[in-house]
Image (cartoon, rainbow, N blue to C red):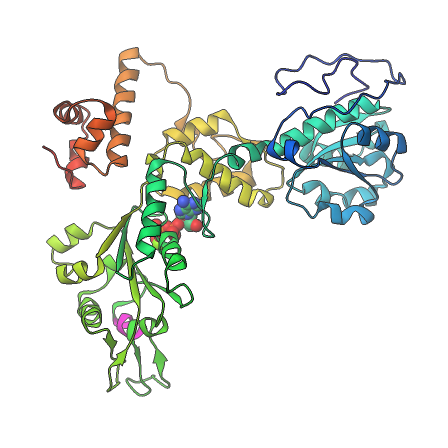
């Protein structure tokens, strides 16, 4: 909070809050000569390239302040909330001044929706009387970057709105510089593994061969299937998804292939199956590993003949679909156990796409968290501006067994639960993943070595020669280190080439 104007406050020329000199205090009422337009404190993509908008909500806006702010480069829109509501319909960052002292108690309560606007950074103008009002305190504490109590100088306000604007623009810096999102499906990924996935999706989309997608739970298998369909020549046709694990054994065939009226008791009318629904488009068979053996036989027959038989029907019906299937279970093991037909697998898996687990996506972990925060931040009661260092540290050390879905859930929960403007490790439920435990240097080196090997193996799908080349060691050394760190089992399970 500022009582009055700072004399030497660096209205321009500094790039971070931390680098600013402490403010000095001027006696109330001392005026400061207008300063010439200056570059913003935070040179964000929006700030340098676009107009900087400032919304000033007041019963009677102070005209001197408005001219001053215009003079220092703001595009000011001033007036009552009713006249300015349209100015809030923007996704671009916005600085805001709200003159709380000019509103009655009833009007103040109506300000909250405007103050909640996620892209606006507000500065409140108030006085002692209003500060005694709990509604005003609530609005300031939760939705404003700062407040000025009593008479103010124009320079003070210009300084504060610069900060507020810089803070709301901060989130853009991380996401604006990197091409992170792939297509309309909003797939975020900048790391090599994800770029490789995007290249694969583009290539695979150009053919009509069946695709098999593998990956741990929540890695984005369905999103990938949609992305392939959307880029394929079949994109104008339907995309029909069916979760083979979610339908009871006795229903799966009628669900897949449909039935004729009277085919069984209760079949009062003809039902078109999902395969037929997908005619001309793509059929996505999710959790294909859960398909019962009986249905596997029927699916195989359909793949061979490209014709279906509705239950109770007499004439086979030709259907033209491309099949994308996915599973998070180990189908090789299922085939070895006789739970999945090898001939069906080879029909389904003409092209294979592997989804990398989130823990192997490096910097993308943070980028994805920011992406989720951007998308859902209006869910929270407070204005959340980013992640605290503890949260970032925890996100990198956590194993993310539920992958992107788990990340989305944790960040969404944190947005709702956070007590502050920065989400902490505790808000994410990852408090246990932070804190530098006291350790010897040898133990720290050992842990870092193990983690580097683990991540490299994940990135290279347990191909020892590739991981060894990346780590700059021989394959023999890598194998020895894997044994020493107890990582040999993982390589075996995932079908690596141990030699
Ligand atoms: N790269 C990504 N960028 C942004 N969001 C993603 C990404 N990958 C997955 N998601 C999101 O994560 C969630 C899980 O994705 P999806 O359902 O495609 O995963 P899945 O592998 O099919 O999961 P499951 O194995 O549980 O079926 C979805 O909300 C999806 O939008
Ligand atoms: Mg899925």
Regarding residue 220, the answer to whether it shows in the image is yes
As rendered, which of 21 and 420 lies closer to the eye?
Answer: 21
Q: Is residue 389 left or right of residue 309?
A: right
Task: Please check the rendered image and state whether residue 251 is part of the magenta-colored stretch, yes or no.
Answer: yes
Please check the rendered image and state whether residue 300 is part of the magenta-colored stretch, yes or no.
no
Tell whether 302 sits left or right of 390. left
Q: Is residue 15 above or below residue 103?
A: above
Vertical side of 469 occupied by 96: above or below = below
Q: Residue at x 77, y 44 (%)?
A: 109
- Across and down, in percent, residue 63 comes to 89, 33
Magenta span = 250-255
Q: Quadrant of residue 24?
A: top right
Image quarter (top left, top right, bottom left or bottom right) of the C terminus: top left
Residue 449, image x, y percentages = 26, 21
Front residue of 403/164: it is 164
Q: Decide if residue 131 is in sight here.
A: no
Which quarter of the image is occupied by the N terminus?
top right
Residue 119: horizontal and vertical position, in percent? Answer: 65, 39
Residue at (46, 40) in percent of width and height: 180
User: Residue at (28%, 84%) from the top-left corner?
Assistant: 264
Q: Position of residue 344 (x, y in %)?
A: 17, 62
Q: Give the prevailing secondary structure in the magenta stretch.
A: helix
The residue lying toward the viewer, choosing from 182 and 21, is: 182
Quadrant of the image occupied by residue 263: bottom left
Q: Quadrant of ligand 2?
A: bottom left
Q: Count every numbered label the image shows and give the total.
A: 0
């Amino acid at each position: 909070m500022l009582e009055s104007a700072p004399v030497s406050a660096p209205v321009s020329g500094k790039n971070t809050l931390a680098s600013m000199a402490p403010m000095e205090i001027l006696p109330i009422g001392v005026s400061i000569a207008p300063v010439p337009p200056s570059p913003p404190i935070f040179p964000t993509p929006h700030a340098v390239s676009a107009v900087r908008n400032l919304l000033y909500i007041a019963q009677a806006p102070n005209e001197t302040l408005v001219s001053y702010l215009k003079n220092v480069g703001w595009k000011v829109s001033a007036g009552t909330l009713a006249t300015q509501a349209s100015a809030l319909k923007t996704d671009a960052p916005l600085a805001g001044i709200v003159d709380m002292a000019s509103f009655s108690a009833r009007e103040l309560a109506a300000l909250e929706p405007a103050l909640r606007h996620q892209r606006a950074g507000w500065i409140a103008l108030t006085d002692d009387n209003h500060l005694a009002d709990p509604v005003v305190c609530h609005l300031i504490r939760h939705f404003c970057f700062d407040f000025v109590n009593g008479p103010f100088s124009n320079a003070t306000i210009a300084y504060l709105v610069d900060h507020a604007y810089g803070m709301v623009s901060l989130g853009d810096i991380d996401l604006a510089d990197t091409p992170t999102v792939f297509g309309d499906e909003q797939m975020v990924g900048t790391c090599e593994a994800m770029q490789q996935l995007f290249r694969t999706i583009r290539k695979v989309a150009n053919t009509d061969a069946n695709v098999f997608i593998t990956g741990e739970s929540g890695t984005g298998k369905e999103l990938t299937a949609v992305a392939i369909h959307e880029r394929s020549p079949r994109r104008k046709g339907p995309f029909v998804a069916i979760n083979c694990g979610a339908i009871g054994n006795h229903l799966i065939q009628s669900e897949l292939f449909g039935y004729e009226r009277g085919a069984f008791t209760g079949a009062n009318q003809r039902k078109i199956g999902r395969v037929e629904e997908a005619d001309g488009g793509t059929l996505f068979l999710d959790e294909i590993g859960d398909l019962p053996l009986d249905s596997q036989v029927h699916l195989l027959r359909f793949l061979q003949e490209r014709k279906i038989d509705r239950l109770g029907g007499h004439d086979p019906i030709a259907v033209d679909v491309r099949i994308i299937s996915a599973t998070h279970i180990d189908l090789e093991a299922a085939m070895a156990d006789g739970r999945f037909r090898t001939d069906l697998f080879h029909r389904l898996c003409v092209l294979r796409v592997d989804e990398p687990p989130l823990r192997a996506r490096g910097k993308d972990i943070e980028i994805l968290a920011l992406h989720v925060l951007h998308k859902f931040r209006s869910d929270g009661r407070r204005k959340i501006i980013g992640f605290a260092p503890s949260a970032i540290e925890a996100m990198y050390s956590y194993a993310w067994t539920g992958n992107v879905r788990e990340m989305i859930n944790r960040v969404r929960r944190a947005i709702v639960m956070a007590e502050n403007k920065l989400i902490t490790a505790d808000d994410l439920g990852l408090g246990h993943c932070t804190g530098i435990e006291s350790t010897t240097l040898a133990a720290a080196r050992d842990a870092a070595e193990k983690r580097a090997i683990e991540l490299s193996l994940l990135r290279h799908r347990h191909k020892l020669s590739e991981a060894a080349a990346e780590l700059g060691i021989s394959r023999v050394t890598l194998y020895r280190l894997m044994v020493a760190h107890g990582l040999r089992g993982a390589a075996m399970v995932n079908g690596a080439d141990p030699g």
